[in-house]
Image (tube, rainbow, N blue to C red):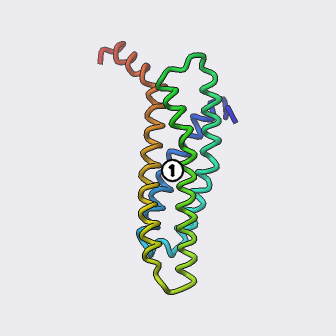
Amino acid sequence: MTVINGLPAHVLLVHLLVVLVPLTAVLEIVCASWAGVRRGATVWLTLILAVVTLVLTPITTDAGEWLYDLRRHPDPILQQHAERGGWMIYFAVALLVVAVALAVLHVAERRSDKRRLPATIAIAIVAVAVGITSVVQLYRIGDSGAQSVWGNEIAHLKQATGK
């Protein structure tokens, strides 16, 4: 998928990830740290969002690679954006692993009355680490992409308007 409705698919798909990654990360942290939320349907919503994020990440990356290949001489910031974007799949996989662990914990807690405190603490720590690093990586990818597209444009507009 390279073009949607005349626009580069990457430009449109990236907005889905900008919403899905932080939403999934926050839901994982909430489910991992709050047993009441984990006992409800939120854990299944979180798992679905993690799966959608994992599916959309390589599609978005592939669309970005197509756009990148259109440039004859990509500038260093665009190269940095492409490199950072290539790493996002690992963060999407990590989000899915945490979501699966939360679902397993949810099922285990429903099958018995025992609280699995060590597992709950371990999953909560991993959920916080994966959630924060995923959002930070997404920010870094987006920042370098925005700098590549808009950095020179904004500087040019500032010069032209004198502001």
At label 1, counting other C-alpha atoms closer than 10 Å, the crowd grade (few under 14, some 14-19, many 20 or more) is many
Residue sitting at x 46%, y 55%: 130
**Number of marks:** 1
Q: Which residue lies furthest to the right in this view?
A: 1
From this view, report whether residue 90 is shown above or below residue 159: below
Q: In which quarter of the image is residue 151?
A: top left
Front residue (pair 129, 46): 129
The quarter of the image holding the C terminus is top left
Residue sitting at x 45%, y 60%: 126
Residue sitting at x 41%, y 63%: 125
Q: Which residue lies furthest to the bottom in this view?
A: 113
Residue 45 coordinates in the image, percent (x, y): 56, 64
Left or right side of 162 for 145: right
Residue sitting at x 47%, y 61%: 27
From this view, report whether residue 163 is shown above or below residue 127: above
From this view, report whether residue 147 is shown above or below residue 17: above
At label 1, the amino acid type is Val
Left or right side of 32 for 66: right
Q: Residue furthest top?
A: 160
Front residue (pair 70, 121): 121
Residue 81 coordinates in the image, percent (x, y): 50, 32
The quarter of the image holding the N terminus is top right
- Residue at image mark 1: 21
Residue 7 coordinates in the image, percent (x, y): 62, 30
Q: Which SS class for mark 1?
A: helix
